[in-house]
Image (cartoon, coloured by chain):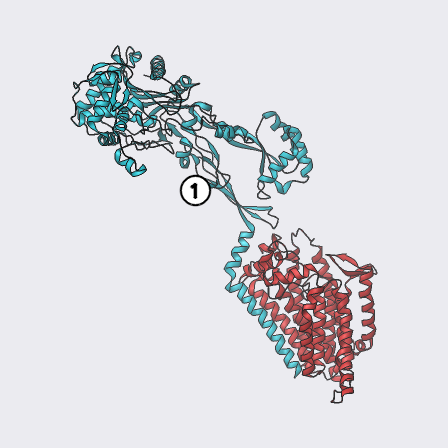
Chain colours: A red, B cyan
Amino acid sequence: MNKQWNRTIWIHALLIMAFGLVSLYSASYDNLRVSSQVFYDQLTFVGLAVLIMYWISRRDYRKFYDVAYVLFAINLALLVGVHVAGRHALGARRWIELGGLSFQPSELMKLSLILLLGRYLSTRRPALSFDLVSVSRGLWRNLILPLLLTVVPVLLIFKQPDLGTAILLMGIFLIMIFMSGLEFQYLGWLLGVSAAGLPLLWCVMKQYQKDRLLVFLNPNIDPLGAGYTIIQSKIAVGSGGLWGKGWLSGTQNQLNFLPERHTDFIFSVIGEEWGLVGALALVYCYFMVVRAGLDIAEHTKDNFGRLVAVGIVGILMLQVFINIGMVIGLCPVVGITLPFISYGRTSFLVFAILLGFLLSLSRRRNIF
Amino acid sequence: MRIKIIRLISLGLLGLLACELAYLQVVRHRYFFDLSRNNRIRVVPLEGKRGRVLDRNGKIIADNRLSFCASVIPQEVRNEKELFSFLGQVFGEDPQVLFRRYQAGKFAPFAPVVIQEDLSEEIAVKLEENKFRFPGLLIEESFRRFYPFSETFAHVLGYVGKADLLDLEKMKEYGYTPLSLVGKSGVEEYYNQFLRGKPGGLQIEVNSRGQQVRLLGLRSPAGGEDVTLTLDHRLQTMSADLLAGKNGAIIVMDLSDGGILSMVSFPGFDPNMFSRRTDGNETADVFSNPDSPLLNRAVNGQYPPGSIFKIVVSLAGLESNKITPATSFDCPGFYAVGRQQFRCAHTHGVQNLIEGIAHSCNVYFFHLGLMVGAAEMDRYARLLGLGHPTYIDLPHEAGGTVPSPLQRKVSRNQGWFKGDTLNLSIGQGDVLATPLQLVRLMAIVANEGRDVRPHVVLSIGAQRVDQHPLRHTVQFKAKSFADVLRGLRATVTDEEGTAHALDIKGLRVAGKTGTAQTSGDREHHAWFVGYAESETRRIAFCIFLEYGGSSANAVDVAKDLLVRMRQEDLL
C-alpha cells in the first residue's frame, strides 16, 4: 500500500514537471520579454528538485520536528531582512540575496509555517471544558496563539506586497487548525470574525490589488490595463478548444498577447496549446498527488506527521485551484505560482521539499 | 472524519476547475477562438490603379502620374526625434509639423504613414541615400491622379479625394476604407465604380504590439477601366478660351446621338489641387469663392431662359391650333395690362410668327401666351424637356422649374395673374432651366421631335456605352417644327434678326437669342441657343453668359466658336 502511494506521487509529480518543462519551452520560445534561458534554468531546478525529493524521502521526517521552531524563527528574520535589504522587482520587495543566490523567504515560509503549526498543534493541549478559566486558557493555547504566530509572517508578507502568499498562509492555518481537532463552534467563530474583518482588508490593500479585485468582478472595466491579462488569458484558454492549437502553435502565446506567461499565467499556455484534454490531464495529475497525500495522512498515526501531510496537501491544492482559477477567471488575480510548472526557483524547491516530506512520511509511518 | 471533509473539499475544488475548463474550451470555444483570431490578423487594404479618362480621340485627360512619397513605418523607427529633424531639414519644414502629421496618420505599427507626397527627384534621391541611417523611413512610389488639361475639363471630369464619412456610409459594402480615393464630382464620381477597379489587400499576422510577424495572404488589386468621353479636347480647349474671363457655360452637343462634344463652365478650378497635399488654404478658397467655381453651370446651374422660352410658346400655339405661322400681331413697343406696361425691346409693328421669333418680339408672344394659357405652356414645356433633368451621366443634375397656376397654388398658396402669364410667355418670372436643358430643347426642335439623351461617356474599356440615342420622339406635327425652325433660321438670316452675325458662309446656323432679366441691379444673363449644320456634322450648342448683359455678347461668342470650329475642321 505505502509503496503504491509513493509511486503514485513520484509518477504524477514527474509527469507534472515534464509537462511544465514542455510548456515553459513554448512560453519562452521566441519571447520578446524573457529569453529561452528560463527553460534551461528550469531544467536544472527540475533535476535539483528530484534530487531533493529523493534525499528528503530517505530522511526521518522527525528531524523536521526538531528544527521546526528554529526554522520558523530564521525565516521570520529573513522576512524582516527582506523589508530592510530586499531586492526590488515587479514593484515588490520579495527577494533576498544569500551567498550570491536570490530567493524568496515568503515561499520558504510556506514550509516553515506548516512545520511550526504541525509541531505546535500536535503537542497535547488541555481539552476545553466548561470551566471558564480553562476555556479561556484552552482558547488561548489552541487558537489565539497559533493565530498570532501565523499573522506575524502573514503581515510581513502582505507588506511586501504579496497578497497571494499571505492568503495561502492563512489557508494553511485554517486547514491545519481544522485538522487539529478544534471544536466546530470555535471554527465557526473564527470564520465569522475573519469574514467581518474582510472589509478592513480592503482598506489596507494597495491600489493595484483593489484594481485586480474589481477587474475580477468585471474585466471589461479596464480592458487594456488591469483587465488585460485576464481577458487575454481567458481568450487563450477558450480558443484552445478540445484538442488545443498544438505545441508552439498557440497564437496568443507565440504572438506575445499573454503577459507573465512563463510564471503565474503559464496555465494559459497549456490551455491554449493542449486544449481541454491537456488541461484536464494536468488537473488529474494534481488530483492524484492530492489524493495519495491525503491517503498517507489518513494512515499516519503520528499527529505531527498527519498535520504536516494535510498542510502540504492543502497548500498544493489551494495553489493549484487559485492559480488555474485566476487564469480562467474563477478567482481574482493574486500572484500565485502553479506548483512544479511556473518558472521560479524558490517555489519549485519548496514544493520539492514538501513532497519529499510526504514521501518520507509514507515510508516511516509504521514505526509508531 | 475531518480528513474526509478535506478530501471532499479538494474533489469539489478540482471538479469546479474541470467544469469551468470544459465550459470555456468546449461550450464557448467558438467565441474565444474568434477573439484570438481577431487579435492576430489584420487586413491592409490596397487600392488598384484608377482607370484613365480619354477624350473621343484617345487623348488622355485624366491620368495617373508616378510620384514619390516619403513614408514612415512606425514599428521600425528607432529614434523619432532624429528622424524627424532630418526630414524637416530635407523638406525645409518644421519637424514639429511633420511629426504631428505622422501622429495623425498613424493607425497601425506596420502601416506606413505618408509624411510628404510628390517629392522632387532631387529630394527623393537625397532620402534614398540616407535611408540606411533611419530605419523605418520608406520612399514609396505611388500613383497620383493627374489632369493634364487642368481647368479645361474640370467640371466634366470632377476630381478625386479621400472618401469622407458620407461616401463611406454610402459605399461601405463595396469595400471602401477611409484611405480609398473616390470621385467627388463629374465623371470621376458618376463612373467611380468603373474607374476604381478591384481593391486588393494584404492579410498579415501581428503580435501583441501590432507588429507584423508574417504575411498570410495577398490579393493583388486590379486596375480600373479606362473611360472614353464623347468630348473633343480641341473643341473643349477652344470653348474654354472663348469663355476665359467671363462667367457662364458653353455646351456643344452632337445632334445625331446626344454626345456632348464640349462642356465648359466658368469660373473653373484646377482639379489637380485636390490630389495635392495642401494645408487646406487653396481648396478652402475654392469652396468659399462667391463665384462658386466648383459649380458646373452647364448642368447644375439653373437660370431664367428668357426669350429662349419663346420656342416653347411658339410650338404650343401651333400644336394647339391657336395660330398659324401667318397669324400676326401688332407691336406698339409695349403691352398694357391695366395700368401696367409690359415692354418690348423695339416697336416692331405688325409681325407674323416667323418675324416674331426672328426679332424676338415680346408683344407678339404676350398675345400668343395669353391665347395659349399658362397651363398649356407648362404642359408643352414639360413635353419639350423643361422642368425635369435630362438624365445626363453627370452627378447632381438640376431639374429646372416651370411654373403653372396649379404649382403656384400648391407650393405657395398664391394666385396666378395675367401678368404671370405674360412673364412666362417670354421666359421670365419663375421659370428656370439649365443650359443643358435648353440644348436638348434645341435638339428636339432641330431633329423635328426626335429626342436625344445628352451624355458624356462614349465607352468604358472596350465596351461602347449605349446611351439610348433614340429614346423617344415628341409627337408634334412635322409642320409645327418646320415653322418654328423657319423662325429660328430667320433669326440668323434676316437682316433684322437678333443673331444675324451668325450668318456664316458654308454653315447653316439657326437659333434663338435670350436676354434674361435678373433680380437686383445686376446685368442680364445673355443666351444664345442654336444649332449648326455643315456638310459633315450637325451640332446643337448653347452659349450662356452669366450676368453677361445683352444677348449680342452671347452671339459674338457663338460666332467666334463657329468660325474657329470651321477653321479647325471640327464642323
> Image quarter for residue B405?
top left
Front residue of this view, candidates A322 and A50: A322
Residue A318 on image: x %, y %: 66, 71
Residue B268 on image: x %, y %: 44, 24
**In percent of the image, x 59 and y 39: which residue is there?**
B104
What residue did someone put label 1 on?
Answer: B171
Q: Is residue A210 visible?
A: yes
Quarter of the image that includes the C terminus of chain B: top left
Front residue of this view, candidates A344 and B284: B284
In the displayed structure, A47 sits above or below B231; it is below
Quarter of the image that includes the N terminus of chain B: bottom right
> Image quarter for residue A311?
bottom right
Front residue of this view, candidates B32 and B433: B433
Amino acid bearing label 1: Met
In the displayed structure, A111 sits above or below A344; it is below
**In percent of the image, x 60 and y 71: which residue is there?**
A284
Crowding at label 1, few (<14), some or many (≥20) Cα neighbours within 10 Å? Answer: few
In the image: residue B165, left or right of residue A157: left
Residue A19 on image: x %, y %: 64, 64
In the image: residue A153, left or right of residue B278: right
Q: Residue furthest front?
A: B339
Residue B206 on image: x %, y %: 58, 48
Count of residue discs: 1
Q: Is residue B446 visible?
A: no
**In percent of the image, x 80 and y 65: which residue is there?**
A79
Pointer 1 chain: B
> Image quarter for residue B534?
top left
In the displayed structure, A241 sits above or below B139; it is below
